[in-house]
């Protein structure tokens, strides 16, 4: 049983904001999911240490989300606390000699625009990815032959004992949609990327080109969690799904996008159960027809985990 009154007092003392019974559909780009017990917005690293230590000491389940772009939440909600980075951790970006440092709650879009403003190249591939810097580190986000591992220099994180860690990129076990943060209960608080000087108009042109390609090929007009399946070794999920004739396959409000087979979208009123039914059907058909096993890419939040 979570004592929200006591937790609220802890949050007030730490300068954090607690909002009870927030629907996960309001916090995720899929627009799916029931309510969590409370949403806590953390303004700085000190508040993160205080609140997370309290939650762990009191064995209160919690999860940290960024921009909610790679998440699928259960219809029955989450019997725990959702944490979100705010304040300077979601806004402040600094630069020194090509080393750009920001809080994990900063959006990738804003980090890319900062790089553009300062004529720094290396992040163009990330322009248009609808996530946070922390999420990009956590899953080594990538697109158009670029990955966060190519620019990431170091990370500040909170370990399971409430201690701050500074980890170099070589210590993060970065791979395809993978990082050390999937192996340990550590929380990304801040990241530094190493960029190089470039020509501002060339950077802008590349960003606009990639964004245009994204808009023309991806179903951005519908809520989704982005790419629904990880790329299997030796092929591409969208290619396999398309070849199996699954474009447009629909259950309830969930559908394999008719525009891009790698996306399962919310056509309106989709539930967690709808999405999972579509995904399971796709996995079964693709395995039966091609032998490839497709793994879900989005993280799942809630009782259905």
Image: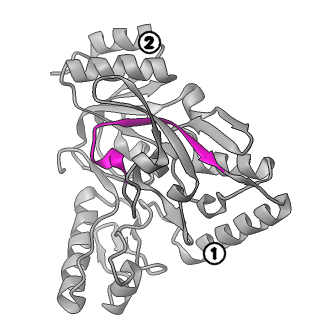
Rendering coords of residue 247 (x, y %)? 37, 84
- Residues 89 and 280: in front is 89
Q: Is residue 22 above or below residue 31?
A: above
Residue shown at 27% from the left, 68% from the top:
295
- The colour style of the image is one colour
Q: Is residue 256 above or below residue 49?
A: below
Q: Quadrant of residue 272?
A: bottom left
Can residue 67 be seen from the camera position used here? no
Looking at the image, is mark 1 or mark 2 earlier in the sequence?
2
Q: Which residue is mark 1?
A: 213
Q: CA distance from mark 1 to mark 2?
A: 44 Å
Q: Residues within 10 Å of mark 2 (few under 14, many from 20)?
A: some
Residue shown at 27% from the left, 22% from the top:
55
Q: Disc 1 on helix, strand or loop?
A: helix
Q: Is residue 20 above or below residue 76?
A: above
- Residues 302 and 138: in front is 138
Residue shown at 45% from the left, 50% from the top:
170
Q: Is residue 37 above or below residue 247?
A: above
Q: Which residue is mark 2?
A: 14
Please state the extent of the stretch shown in magenta in the rendering. Answer: 179-194
Q: Residues within 10 Å of mark 1 (few under 14, many from 20)?
A: few
Judge from the rendering whether residue 142 lies leftward or rightward of residue 270; answer left or right: right
Rendering coords of residue 81 (x, y %)? 30, 30
Q: Quadrant of residue 21?
A: top left
Q: Which mark is residue 43?
A: none
Q: Disc 2 on helix, strand or loop?
A: helix
Judge from the rendering whether residue 112 lies leftward or rightward of residue 205; answer left or right: left
Judge from the rendering whether residue 124 lies leftward or rightward of residue 27; answer left or right: right
Residue shown at 52% from the left, 29% from the top:
86
Rendering coords of residue 6 (x, y %)? 28, 10
Say if the magenta span includes residue 214. no
């Amino acid at each position: 049983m979570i004592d929200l009154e006591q937790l609220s007092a802890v949050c007030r003392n730490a300068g954090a904001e607690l909002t009870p019974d927030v629907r996960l559909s309001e916090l995720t780009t899929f627009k799916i999911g029931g309510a969590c017990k409370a949403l806590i917005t953390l303004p700085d690293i000190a508040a993160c240490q205080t609140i997370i230590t309290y939650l762990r000491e009191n064995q209160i389940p919690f999860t940290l989300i960024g921009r909610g772009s790679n998440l699928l939440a259960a219809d029955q909600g989450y019997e725990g606390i959702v944490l979100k980075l705010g304040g300077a951790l979601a806004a402040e970006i600094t630069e020194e000699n090509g080393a750009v440092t920001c809080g994990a709650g900063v959006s990738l879009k804003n980090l890319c625009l900062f790089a553009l403003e300062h004529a720094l190249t290396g992040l163009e591939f990330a322009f248009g990815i609808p996530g946070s810097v922390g999420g990009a580190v956590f899953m080594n986000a990538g697109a158009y032959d670029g990955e966060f591992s190519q620019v990431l220099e170091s990370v500040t994180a909170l370990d399971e004992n409430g201690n701050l860690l500074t980890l170099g990129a070589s210590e993060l076990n970065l791979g395809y949609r993978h990082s050390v943060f999937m192996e340990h209960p550590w929380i990304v608080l801040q990241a530094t990327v190493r960029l190089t000087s470039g020509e501002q108009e060339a950077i802008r042109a590349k960003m606009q080109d990639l964004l245009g390609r994204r808009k023309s090929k991806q179903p951005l007009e519908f809520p989704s969690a982005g790419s629904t399946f990880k790329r299997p070794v030796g092929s591409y999920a969208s290619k396999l799904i398309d070849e199996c004739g699954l474009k447009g396959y629909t259950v309830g409000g969930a559908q394999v996008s008719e525009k891009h087979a790698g996306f399962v979208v919310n056509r309106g009123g989709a539930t967690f159960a709808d999405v999972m039914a579509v995904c399971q059907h796709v996995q079964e058909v693709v395995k039966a027809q091609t032998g490839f096993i497709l793994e879900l890419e989005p993280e799942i939040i809630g009782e259905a985990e």
